[in-house]
Image (cartoon, rainbow, N blue to C red):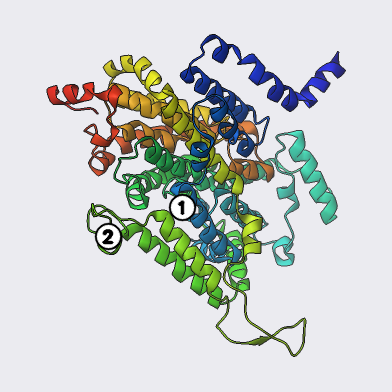
Amino acid sequence: MATCWQGLWAYRSYLIVLLLPILLLPLPILIPTKEAYCGYAIILMALLWCTEALPLAVTAFFPVILFPMMGIMDASEVSVEYLKDTNILFVGGMLVAIAVEHWNLHKRIALRVLLIIGVRPALLILGFMLVTAFLSMWISNTATTAMMLPIAQAVLEQLHKMPMGKDVEEGRNNPAFELQEPSTQKEETKLDEKDNKQDHPVPPAPSKPSMQQNKEQLHFNQGMSLCVCYSASIGGIATLTGTTPNLVLQGQVNSIFPQNANVVNFASWFGFAFPAMVILLFLSWLWLQVLFLGFNFRKNFGLGDEMREQERAAFDVVRREHKLLGPMTFAEKAVTILFILLVVLWFTREPGFFTGWGNLAFSDKDGKSMPSDGTVAIFIAVIMFIVPSKIPGLTQDPGKPGKLKAPPALLSWNVVKEKMPWNIMILLGGGFALAKGSEASGLSTWLGDKLTPLESVPSPAIAFILCLLIATFTECTSNVATTTLFLPILASMAQAICIHPLYVMLPCTLSASLAFMLPVATPPNAIAFSFGGLRVTDMARAGFMLNIIGVLVITLAINTWSIPMFDLHTFPSWAYSNATASCWVSQANTTTPRP
């Protein structure tokens, strides 16, 4: 019997892929309407995304197959959804991020900031959180975490060495530190392997003060690992290209409401999300400091003399790593200039509160900017393929003496092929195709009609409950899949109950990035967990409170500064449809508009 269950578990992915379409067949058979057909496709894709029985990008191709066969959309109409302006913005942003990562500019920034902030415990956590959050605003959260965690571990090793003993002089690890309080069998195995590799003799059982010190060191290690992975997720929400759910929102808004005046762009998103990110990052720092360092703030900020020797050794590690980078190369300076130019062009293209360069030089007949944020990103990326990585000049090819060779460009296609996450681009397209199919089949209108009873519920309560729901759902499912599935439903609900669509879509998009409780929730969490020293309960305990804090901060943001930014107190004209004709009457008769 046990062998049978093991066989079923081993073949679970095949069974899910084969059985799910069959089990869901009663829906389109018993209700032969386009709405039911589209619902069948969405439910099937949602379950496959949740179980990951197929790669996420492969599941995203299902609309290309199902929608034409069900008579919902023509194949050419579905295919167009897979390469929209939002996808181009994603590609352009990733190309620039790859260049920054390729030339180690992100590492130079990280080490420089750490040298400025210092290595006292509380400030060290703050420094790593600030650097990680800033870098994840522009490059992949996963790449940022993978770079910052080894630096954090190297600094921690120096902090935990004996302050005046022989171990510091010889640069070896303190044996007492290696015998950290074991929490699981996995940790014991890793520590045993480490001892064997370094040929350290097994020391005698540590005394009570030593055990207490080891426990504090373990907690500090856990706090450092979690602060890096959490701040990577938090930093990504600040910019439109920082994390994929933000781009999903922009694409869904432009797809569902094509008449909107580019309401979600780089500048408007930054104005809304950046203050929320700063508040959430600060509160996260306070929570992690209290949870892993305790309430002894004098000790946390290194105001005593007991940690001076370790701090000096840890500071030397950061300084040595920074020194190894050498002076900034021509390539790093060129990438820095182009990166700054990209950000400036993004902010000034069509900011809304003054006339941007897009409105002045490249406007259409209505005065709107014809270039988009994607245009700017691709423009800068193309320049990176043109600008040489060294000061222009002819050099000798070391492989072929006597032959002259030009320096390579800042960005090459071989590098791009290795690092570009094409699967995310396909996943984005699948989400846009689902949203378009929901609209074409009438499923969006049907959902809106069913959700009209929510009109009696206060808008802030609706937004708060939805944020909690999304934050819980995203712990078990890809944040991209979560936003892809929920945003079209939220747009229909907003139209049905006559509230601004962005009032529910913006906070739910941010909530999709609040995946703090489980190692499998995000790649940064998994990377931090793989470094050891963490149990699932440690991550769940820290992440649960961060989820609550995150939802409260997002609720604050959507009910304060975002209201004048996006005119959330009114129902926008671009969101009207046949199903929302009553909104004209309700908005004209009410003196207190929603929200």
Q: Report the residue that reaches farthest toward the bottom.
A: 402
Identify the amino acid type marked 2: Gly
x and y, in percent, of residue 480 in the image? 52, 37
Residue at position x 61%, y 56% in the image: 147
Specify whether residue 505 is in view. Answer: yes
Residue at position x 72%, y 54% in the image: 174
Residue at position x 65%, y 20% in the image: 20
x and y, in percent, of residue 5 in the image? 81, 17
> Of residues 65 and 483, which is closer to you in this image?
65
Identify the amino acid type marked 1: Leu
Q: Quadrant of the C terminus?
A: top left
> Of residues 442 and 420, which is closer to you in this image?
442
Residue topped by disc 1: 89
The circle drawn on residue 356 is 2
Query: Dot 1 lies on which element?
Result: helix
> Of residues 263 and 362, which is closer to you in this image?
362
| Side of 500 where 122 appears, left or right | right
Mark 2 vs mark 1, CA separation in Å = 19 Å
Q: Is residue 427 above or below residue 142?
A: above
Q: Quadrant of the N terminus?
A: top right
Q: Is residue 534 above or below residue 145?
A: above
The circle drawn on residue 460 is none
Mark positioned earlier in the residue sequence (2 or 1): 1
| Side of 10 where 405 appears, left or right | left
x and y, in percent, of residue 137 in the image? 46, 52
